[in-house]
Amino acid sequence: MASAVAEKPMRAGPRKVSQVAELTDRLGRATSAIVTDYRGLTVKQLGELRTKLRSEGIEYHVVKNTLARRAAAEAGVGDFSTVLVGPVGLALGFGDLSAPARILNEYFRVNRRLPIVAGLVEKRVLDADGVRAVADLPSREVLLAQLAGTLQSPLSSLAGALTSILSNFAATLDAYREKLAAAG
């Protein structure tokens, strides 16, 4: 018996070939792809969500599963095909890998629509809990700032300690010079 995700031969019409090629390219370039169940959203809500995602450099596509599975295989992420079941929308992020997950997770918290099904982060398939964990990560800029602060702190302490030692040494030399001048 064939599995639910078994591939049917695709009739290679020019439109389907083009759609698969475009999605293959996007999946290959994306740092993250979040799979959502878009059922229950109105066309207006979907449009508002797309506008919000687009402002962050994220694309949202409602895709046919057979075409998306073929694109995933061609993009070298065949394992991703297993989560492309049912009516799905894909949020593709090309920069900060946590941004799509963070925005979609917040959208779900507020609206109780558009649940996260799974995700693909740096070519690794994650379940919904894994995607929510990625959503809780700070942005790349925040992480870099935290790293810089962590690296800078010991250096600042070292600089302060060296300055203190040099000040004490200079004060000791000055006191010794004054003592010699008074004795002399």
Image (cartoon, helix red, strand yellow):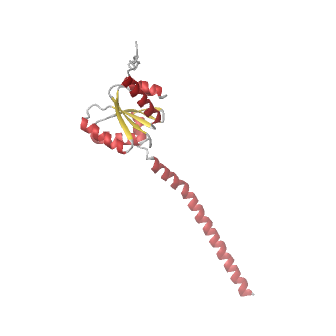
Of 107 and 21, the residue lying toward us: 21
Q: Is residue 141 above or below residue 5?
A: below
Q: Is residue 45 above or below residue 10?
A: below
Q: Quadrant of the N terminus?
A: top left
Residue 48 horizontal/vertical position (percent): 28, 41
Please report the residue visible at 38 percent of the width from the left and 42 percent of the height from the top: 102
The residue furthest top is: 1
Q: How many marks?
A: 0
Residue 101 horizontal/vertical position (percent): 39, 39
- Residue 83 visible in the picture: no
- Residue 20 visible in the picture: yes
For residue 106, side relative to residue 145 (left or right): left
For residue 43, side relative to residue 155 (left or right): left
Please report the residue visible at 49 percent of the width from the left and 50 percent of the height from the top: 144
Q: Is residue 5 above or below residue 165?
A: above
Q: Image quadrant of residue 169?
A: bottom right
Of 125 and 132, the residue lying toward us: 125
Please report the residue visible at 46 percent of the width from the left and 47 percent of the height from the top: 140
Residue 183 horizontal/vertical position (percent): 74, 86
